[in-house]
Amino acid sequence: MCFGPSQAEKDAAAKQRSEAEQRQRHEAKMGAEQKREDISDALSARSASRYGSKGGKGRRSLLQSYTSSGFLGRF
């Protein structure tokens, strides 16, 4: 007759499950830290290139501009 898994097998399975969950949380945390570092590196590189290049056009409005060459200046 088969009565199912023994208590030792149940304990071993529970231990393996908890170790797997802990490993998964650790990997998710490491991935989040890596992503955070990548984003901060990208932002710092972007801001350095933006402020390092003087004389750039910068952000301009498509609707209006000082020379009336925007969208509204055509009509």
Image (cartoon, rainbow, N blue to C red):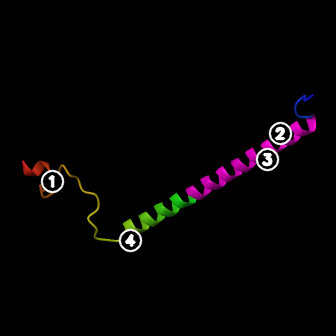
Question: Is tag 2's residue or tag 1's residue first in the polypeptide sequence?
Answer: 2
For the residues labelled 4 and 3, the Cα–Cα distance comes to: 49 Å
Kind of residue sitting beneath label 3 = Glu
For the residues labelled 2 and 1, the Cα–Cα distance comes to: 67 Å
Magenta stretch, residue numbers: 7-36
Q: Identify the residue under disc 2.
A: 14
Q: Secondary structure at mark 3?
A: helix
Q: Secondary structure at mark 2?
A: helix
**Image quarter (top left, top right, bottom left or bottom right) of the N terminus:** top right
Q: Disc 4 vs disc 3: which is toward the camera?
A: 3
Residue 52: assigned label: 4
Question: Is tag 4's residue or tag 3's residue first in the polypeptide sequence?
Answer: 3
Q: Is residue 29 magenta?
A: yes
Magenta segment, prevailing SS (helix, strand or loop): helix
For the residues labelled 4 and 2, the Cα–Cα distance comes to: 56 Å
Q: Identify the residue under disc 3.
A: 19
Give the image location of residue 6, x and y in percent.
92, 34
Q: Disc 1 vs disc 4: which is toward the camera?
A: 1
Q: Nearer the viewer, residue 31 or 21?
A: 21
Residue at x 47% of width, y 60% of height: 43
Q: Nearer the viewer, residue 66 or 49?
A: 49
Mark 1 burial class by Cα count in 10 Å: few <14, some 14-19, many 20+: some
Give the image location of residue 49, x and y in percent.
40, 68
The quarter of the picture where residue 65 lies is: bottom left
Q: Is residue 33 magenta?
A: yes
Give the image location of residue 11, x and y in percent.
88, 39
Question: Is tag 4's residue or tag 2's residue first in the polypeptide sequence?
Answer: 2
Q: Secondary structure at mark 4?
A: helix
